[in-house]
Image (spheres, rainbow, N blue to C red):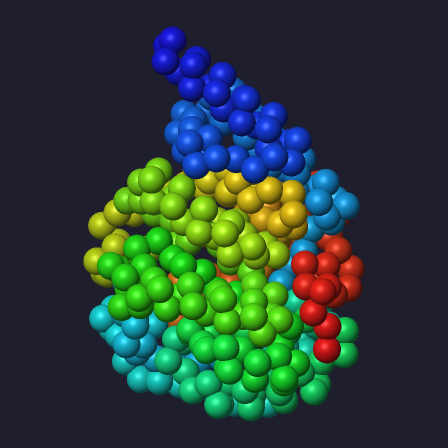
Amino acid sequence: MQRLEANQTEAFRSLDKALRGEILAREEIEELFRVPSKSEAFYAIQYASRKISESVTGGKAEIHGQIGIDIGPCPKNCQFCSFAACNKVFPEPSVLPTTEIISRCLDLEEAGANAIYLMTTANFSFARFIEIAQKVRNKLQKESVLVANIGDFSYEQALELKRVGVNGVYHALRLGEGNTTAINPKRRLESFAAAKEAGLILGNCVEPVGPEHTVEELVEKTLIAREANPVFSGAMRRITIPSTPLSQYGMLSEGKMAHILAVVRLAMGHHILGNCTHEPNVHGAVAGANLLWAEVGSNPRDVEGETHRGISVERCREIYWEADWEVLSGPSQFFQSVRV
């Protein structure tokens, strides 16, 4: 009991430091991740996360809409992904018609999504993505935010993304990268740098988190996420794809994920505006997640070609209402520094 109390005393010191806007050290972040569930400090961490998230965005939360535009057996073999060739969920490739992609993007825009994301499998043709992105941009309102969620890319490709009107990218160095995936972690970091150098805004996340991941791994990926200086970060739990190697570990609860996303929020500092959780849930929003995603089309956590796991913009808005958040109206404030 004395050890537990000592841990919590250190945690409260770190909370005060984070609330003052000071940057937490590796040891302090680790201490916060190790706080026992259902302890006083456990809930204080979530309170502090919510307070910071509200403070840095003027009390406004955001809903971003993503459309998955293709499915198929991806050779990158990320074991947590239903698109992985090794998981044998989608044996044949398929791409939504461009007219359908545009229509769904316009639907998300009309529903009030603060940003629109185009997501592909890692090996999707970059030239074809550019063609699609340009046609989507031409149909969206000028002020709408367009974000790419694609495989790794070069500086020259990042410039091409910007040229056709993409405002930013979502890109993360995932837990298990290089072990449970066939992607070199160095390549992910090179994409971070390419985006920044080209003037694209970066969003990232500590993901996908499962029960098998250690505190040391969480701290490492949190520090890498912070070092990338994204406009938003956060935490996403790994969703079990049945009959795959990682399914043996099960999943973390939303309660545990609320703690993890709150620690990530505290670790990021006040200059990073957004804190996401995925998939959307009330517990995460209460604990400081000011970014949720609506999803249509394909989904790497789903075994259906048309996602059944993804929820609508309206459902995200309902979750925020339950968590007592006000939702931003208009283009994402996270991406304001890059406009078309």
Quadrant where the image shows the N terminus: top left
Name the outermost residue toward the top. Answer: 2
Q: Position of residue 120 (x, y in %)?
A: 45, 76
Query: Which picture quadrant has residue 18?
Result: top right
- Determine whether, in the image, residue 140 is placed left or right of residue 28: right
In the picture, measured across the screen, residue 336 lies left or right of residue 7, that is: right
Would residue 321 be visible to someone looking at this image?
A: no
Q: Is residue 109 above or below residue 39?
A: below
Left or right of residue 76, residue 208 in this image: right
Q: Residue at image x 25%, y 55%?
A: 246
In the image, residue 172 above or below residue 6:
below
Q: Position of residue 192 (x, y in %)?
A: 48, 65
Residue 336 found in image quarter: bottom right
Residue at 27% across / 61% down in the picture? 178
| Near-viewer residue (48 or 254) | 48
Residue 219 x %, y %: 40, 42
Q: Is residue 81 left or right of residue 19?
A: left
Q: Residue furthest front?
A: 197
From this view, report whether residue 149 is shown above or below residue 301: below
The residue closer to the viewer here, 150 or 68, is 150
Tell me which residue sits at (49%, 66%) in the image. Answer: 193
| Residue under the point 50% across and 82% down | 157
Give the x, y percent position of residue 102. Answer: 62, 84
Any part of residue 329 in sight: yes
Viewer-proximal residue among 1 and 201: 201
Q: Quadrant of the C terminus?
A: bottom right
Q: Is residue 330 above or below residue 257?
A: below
